Image: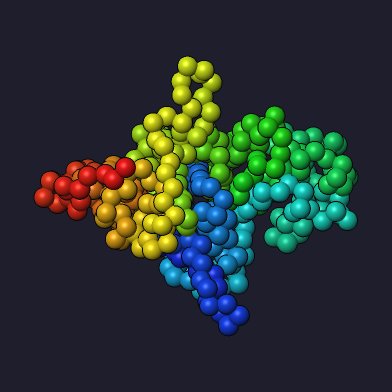
Amino acid sequence: MSTLLEARAITKVFGGGIMSRRQVVALEDFSLIVDDEEPTITGVVGESGSGKTTMARLLLGLEPVTRGAVLFRGRDLGSLSRTERMEFRRQVQMIFQDPFEVYNSFYKVDHALEVPIAKFHLAGSREEARDRIERVLKAVGLQSDETLGRYPHQLSGGQRQRIMVARALLLEPKLIVADEPVSMIDASLRATVLDDLRRLNEQFGISLIYITHDLTTAYQVSHNIVVLYQGSVAEAGDVEMVVGDPQHPYTRLLISSIPLPDPDQRWGGELLEVSRPEVAAGNRGCKFAPRCPHMMPVCLEKPPPLYLSGDHRVAACYLQDQWPTITREDMGSIFIRRPLSSSAAAPKSADQSTTSGLSPTQ
């Protein structure tokens, strides 16, 4: 297997300096593997403050990791040479959330497309550069005569975002990290941009990490999914498995919060969220325990491990303790679409269960 990008148990802690000793763990022991040979779309979902954007900045090398490592084709980002870093910058691109703030309002939108061509020497002449720009604009459904020569404020939010998709496509990357790419545009245009992202994967062989708070769109476009809660992985794996049969109470809560177009079906399902502020104050275990309707004593003692309930799924919940565990460093292997060993998904025997005999506390 050839790995394009790997996050190996990366952790990011903010604070703890001279001005403030308070530390905030924004992301903890996060692992991910992007295959260099088989392009996939991995959705990363979670509510605000779950660590999604921090994860993206670490993968892009925009922030140093506190612990762990981010590897590009097996090399730590911090040890890349100038030439290797330029290759990394070309192969791993970013699409930002706000399709307006990424532009310099003093420049026409052409500037956003011309700069990467010049920086990476992608064209030998102005004519070749223009032809390349027109081709990528057409690939994302834009006409050059309707977009080029205009300032950002003269285009719609959807047009601005699709130009950012075209900009990334210009460099022919292997991976695009898209941070909430449709949250700032009209609902009527979201499907169009999502189709553009899916087309990048299917037609151009580009892998994507799709970051969103919207579980619905993540399900629509992703092959794999990661559910983050307060900087930790709650559940991850094949999107059909995770969304079709969620094993973590937080994942079930996210799914139950999606409105259903059926007046006869109760919105919210059977999972009722609870609030235990007194538990949160001294909790050393599962971060979701203060909100979990299935909290058990063990949940407050130590963080749950990752239980491997299939070749391509894990859940950090003691309710799944009949399954074997894997380390946080090994979690990235579940994102490889090729099957793992069949023994990995075999349930543990009753005497191997770490919480056998414990009943849920309602």
From this view, report whether residue 156 is shown above or below residue 315: above
Residue 183 located left or right of residue 214: right
From the top left corner, tell me how far across and down residue 309 is, in percent: 27, 43
Residue 80 located left or right of residue 67: right
- Quadrant position of residue 106: bottom right
Residue at image coords 46%, 31%: 268
Residue at image coords 83%, 47%: 152
From the top left corner, tell me how far across and down residue 340 is, in percent: 28, 46
Pick out the residue farthest to the bottom. 18
Residue at image coords 56%, 39%: 214
From the top left corner, tell me how far across and down residue 345 is, in percent: 24, 43
Residue 104 located left or right of residue 322: right
Q: What colour scheme does the image use?
A: rainbow
Pick out the residue farthest to the top. 264
Pick out the residue farthest to the front. 278
Instruction: Inspect this view and state whether residue 193 appears.
Output: yes
Quarter of the picture holding the C terminus = top left
Question: Which of 56 and 263 lies nearest the eye of the viewer?
Answer: 263
From this view, report whether residue 109 is shown above or below residue 61: above
Instruction: Inspect this view and state whether residue 6 appears.
Output: no
Question: Which of 231 and 104 lies nearest the eye of the viewer?
Answer: 231
- Quadrant position of residue 154: top right
Q: How many marks?
A: 0
Residue at image coords 19%, 53%: 354
From the top left corner, tell me how far across and down residue 42 is, in percent: 48, 45
Question: Which of 149 and 29 lies nearest the eye of the viewer?
Answer: 29
Residue 331 located left or right of residue 147: left
